[in-house]
Image (tube, rainbow, N blue to C red):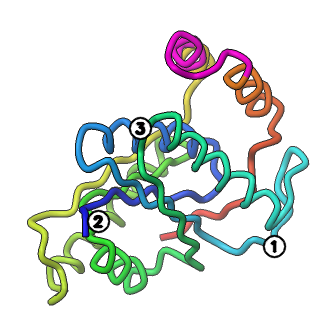
C-alpha cells in the first residue's frame, strides 16, 4: 500500500486552500490524498448548503480537483478526530502527513499542540512503521491570494468556465458546509 496524505476537512473557509496545498504536496511525493470529512452530515450550513447534500458536493469537488491535478483521491468519513480513531486511520492507510485548514491564527496554536500530542501518541503505537508524522496547517486565503489562485488556475490546465464557476460559487458561499472545530 502506498503512503498517503490525510486531508482533514471540516467545512471551514480554509478547506479549499488546504485541499490545493495537499494536492501540491501529493504531486511531489506519493500522489495519494485521503480526503477525510469530519463530523456529522446533518447540520445546516451557511450560504444555502445543507447536510448530506453539502458534504456530497464537497466530496465531488474534492474528487474533481484531484482529477484536474492528477492526484489519486480516496474519500473517508469520520465522526470525529478523536486521537484513537485518527491513530488507527493513520496506521491503516499509512499516512505520513496530515493537512488541515484553520480559520484564524489563534487556531494554529491549538492545532499545533494537538498535532504534537497526536505525534507522541502515534509514536507509541505498535502498528506504526513510519519514521515521523508530518503536519501542515493552512489558513484561508485573503482576497488578493484568492484572485492570484483563480488567475493561476485559468492559465493552467483548468477550463476558464470551470474556474469562474468555482470562484463564483466559493464567493457566494454555495460550496461551504457546516463543520465544527475539534481538539
Residue of label 1: 42
Q: Position of residue 19 (x, y in %)?
A: 50, 44
- Toward the left, the furthest residue is 131
CB of mark 3 within 8 Å of CB of mark 1? Answer: no
**Magenta stretch: dominant SS?**
helix
State which region is magenta.
148-161
* Label 2 to label 3: alpha-carbon separation: 16 Å
Q: Earlier in the sequence, mark 3 or mark 1?
A: 3
Q: Dot 3: within a 10 Å radius of its alpha carbon, few (fewer than 14), some, or many (20 or more) residues?
A: some
**Gap between marks 3 and 1, in whole Å?**
28 Å
User: Please, what secondary structure does the residue beneath circle 1 have?
Assistant: loop
The residues tagged by marks 2 and 1 sit, at their Cα atoms, a distance apart of: 28 Å
Q: Secondary structure at mark 3?
A: helix
User: Vertical placement of 165 versus 88: above or below?
Assistant: above
Indicate which label's residue lies in the foreground, 2 or 1: 2
Q: Secondary structure at mark 2?
A: strand
The single residue placed furthest to the bottom in the displayed view is: 126
Residue 95 is tagged as 2
The disc at residue 21 is 3
**Residue shown at the point (70%, 75%) measured from the top left:** 40
Marks 3 and 2: in contact by CB < 8 Å? no
Q: Give coordinates of residue 13: x percent, y percent.
A: 64, 42
Amino acid at each position: 500500500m502506498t503512503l498517503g496524505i490525510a486531508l482533514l476537512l471540516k467545512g471551514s473557509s480554509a478547506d479549499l486552500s488546504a485541499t490545493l496545498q495537499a494536492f501540491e504536496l501529493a504531486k511531489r511525493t506519493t500522489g495519494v490524498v485521503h480526503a477525510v470529512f469530519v463530523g456529522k452530515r446533518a447540520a445546516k450550513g451557511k450560504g444555502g448548503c445543507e447536510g448530506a447534500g453539502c458534504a456530497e458536493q464537497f466530496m465531488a469537488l474534492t474528487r474533481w480537483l484531484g482529477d484536474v491535478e492528477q492526484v489519486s483521491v480516496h474519500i473517508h468519513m469520520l465522526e470525529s478526530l478523536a486521537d484513537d480513531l485518527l491513530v488507527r486511520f493513520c496506521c491503516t492507510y499509512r499516512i505520513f502527513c496530515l493537512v488541515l485548514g484553520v480559520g484564524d491564527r489563534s487556531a494554529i496554536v491549538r492545532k499545533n499542540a494537538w498535532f504534537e500530542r497526536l505525534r507522541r501518541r502515534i509514536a507509541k503505537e505498535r502498528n506504526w512503521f513510519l519514521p515521523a508524522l508530518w503536519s501542515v496547517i493552512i489558513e484561508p486565503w485573503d482576497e488578493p491570494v484568492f484572485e492570484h489562485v483563480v488567475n493561476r488556475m485559468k492559465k493552467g490546465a483548468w477550463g476558464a468556465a470551470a474556474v469562474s464557476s468555482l470562484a463564483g460559487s466559493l464567493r457566494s458561499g454555495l460550496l461551504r458546509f457546516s463543520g465544527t472545530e475539534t481538539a
